[in-house]
């Protein structure tokens, strides 16, 4: 969790998702402004070439022929009705914001999976190096023993060469493991945004004590499913916005004059009520409605697919965790047995009951089983957390971590 908290602060992807939420809030403000009045102060001054001898009197003809006509006024505009477009747009913007919030949360969950896998990979590679080091030391001890036996004629030089060959191969494997460890550390450091200067603490063995049906019941709460649900609401509101093009629009516009010249100088205000009834605009509105309806249907299908995929992912993760846990237990038993087999072969070799090849084969088997057990142990842990994320249980886990 320490690593995850560092990654949350460092992730550029989460920062981008955060800006998407801010963008959705901006869309809501833009939609809300459609039902609010607009007020401005307008200053104009008209200059024209007036006829000679024209006076600045207040007559109609004189006013129209004035050389200079200044005017200052407050301009008011209030939308009254526009086919409920603004209300649909506001509800759609609200759904868009919730969608972005869920997408941000899903990004946090996916980041947790990345950090978790990187965390366990570092530990696995480190333990692989340790396992290979233990086996290498065992081979080095074999070589010392073989050289001592060769001096008294109880072992052949070919046995020493065979063991030396195995030693070189083990050292090559160790280099491969160290290289894999370096790559794993670099990826982990990329996520947390700082060098890894301390050891990674081991956690407790994971236990999933719930039934599959309990995890499946949580699938509808997954962040990605919730995000697509809100995307469907947004697309539905977009259809309403498009259909508003068939409705008339009503608006009220007014002016309050603070400076006016000519014959209208005594008129301080005026109000204009406008009703715009669309009769024929080609097929533009129909095209917009059809496009929005198609997007709404696509959103519905995506939401339906996401729910089914969520349940499939939960089933797969549940099965993977339980099979891997059983496999880990079996490999743990096999590791104990292979270690004992190697010990017995080494003892029997000293009694001349087996040859050196038998001892080396037992050692290789022990090495392979240890590496497989190490891999299975961390695959089990990885799949445990993948199961939790697949079931959308990250909020509960986050509260437990806190």
Image (tube, rainbow, N blue to C red):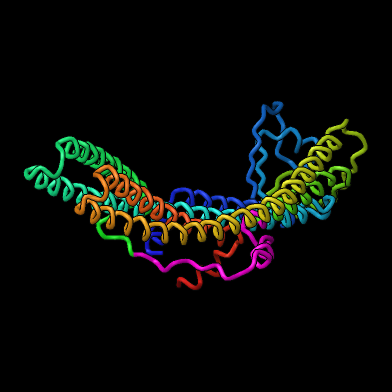
Query: For the view shown, which residue lies furthest in the left direction?
Result: 151
Query: For the view shown, which residue lies furthest in the right direction?
Result: 279
- Residue 174 percent across, percent down from the top left: 26, 44
Q: Is residue 134 magenta?
A: no
Relative placement, left or right, of 163 versus 76 is left
For the C terminus, give its image quadrant.
bottom left
Q: Which residue shows up at 63% across the image and 39% down it? A: 45
- Residue 141 percent across, percent down from the top left: 16, 50
In this picture, which residue range is highlighted in magenta?
202-226
**Displayed quadrant of residue 393:** bottom right
- Residue 257 percent across, percent down from the top left: 71, 52
- Residue 283 seen in the current view: yes
**Displayed quadrant of residue 166:** top left
Q: Which residue shows up at 41% across the image and 62% down it? A: 5
- Residue 77 seen in the current view: no
Relative placement, left or right, of 322 versus 402 is right
Relative placement, left or right, of 275 versus 221 is right
Image height of 164 relative to 217, above or below: above
**Displayed quadrant of residue 150:** top left
Image height of 69 relative to 193, above or below: above
Q: Nearer the viewer, residue 378 or 32?
A: 378
Q: Nearer the viewer, residue 112 or 144?
A: 144
Q: Which residue shows up at 91% across the image and 34% down it? A: 280
For the N terminus, give its image quadrant.
bottom left
Q: Nearer the viewer, residue 221 or 252?
A: 221
Count the marks: 0
Q: Which residue shows up at 67% across the image and 62% down it? A: 216
Q: Nearer the viewer, residue 347 or 353?
A: 353
């Amino acid at each position: 969790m320490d690593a995850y908290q560092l990654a949350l602060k460092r992730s550029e992807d989460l920062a981008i998702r955060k800006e998407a939420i801010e963008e959705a809030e901006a869309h809501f403000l833009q939609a809300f402004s459609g039902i609010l009045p607009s007020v401005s102060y307008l200053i104009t001054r008209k200059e024209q070439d007036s006829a000679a001898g024209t006076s600045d009197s207040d007559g109609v003809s004189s006013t129209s022929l004035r050389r200079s006509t200044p005017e200052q006024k407050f301009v008011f505009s209030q939308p009254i009705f526009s086919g409920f477009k603004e209300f649909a747009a506001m509800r759609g913007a609200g759904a868009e914001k919730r969608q972005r919030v869920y997408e941000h949360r899903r990004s946090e969950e996916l980041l947790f999976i990345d950090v978790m896998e990187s965390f366990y990979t570092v530990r696995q590679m480190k333990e692989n190096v340790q396992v290979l080091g233990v086996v290498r030391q065992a081979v080095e001890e074999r070589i010392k023993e073989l050289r001592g036996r060769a001096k008294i004629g109880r072992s052949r030089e070919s046995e020493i060469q065979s063991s030396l060959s195995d030693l070189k191969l083990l050292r090559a494997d160790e280099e491969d493991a160290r290289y894999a460890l370096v790559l794993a550390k670099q990826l982990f450091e990329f996520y947390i945004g700082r060098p890894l200067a301390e050891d990674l603490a081991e956690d407790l063995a994971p236990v999933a004590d719930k039934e599959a049906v309990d995890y499946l019941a949580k699938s509808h709460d997954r962040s990605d499913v919730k995000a697509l649900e809100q995307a469907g609401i947004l697309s539905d509101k977009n259809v309403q916005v498009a259909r508003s093009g068939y409705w008339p629009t009503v608006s009220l516009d007014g002016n309050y004059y603070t400076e006016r010249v000519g014959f209208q100088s005594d008129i301080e205000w005026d109000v204009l009520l406008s009703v715009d009834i669309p009769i024929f605009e080609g097929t533009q509105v129909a095209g917009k409605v059809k496009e929005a309806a198609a997007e709404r249907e696509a959103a519905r299908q995506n939401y339906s697919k996401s729910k089914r995929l969520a349940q499939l992912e939960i089933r797969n993760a549940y099965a993977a965790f339980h099979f891997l846990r059983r496999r880990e237990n079996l490999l743990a038993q096999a590791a104990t047995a292979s270690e004992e087999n190697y010990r017995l072969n080494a003892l029997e070799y000293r009694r001349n009951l087996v040859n050196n090849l038998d001892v080396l084969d037992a050692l290789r088997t022990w090495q392979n089983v240890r590496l497989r057990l190490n891999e299975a142990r961390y695959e089990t842990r990885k799949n445990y957390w993948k199961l939790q994320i697949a079931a959308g249980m990250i909020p509960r886990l986050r509260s437990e971590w806190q």
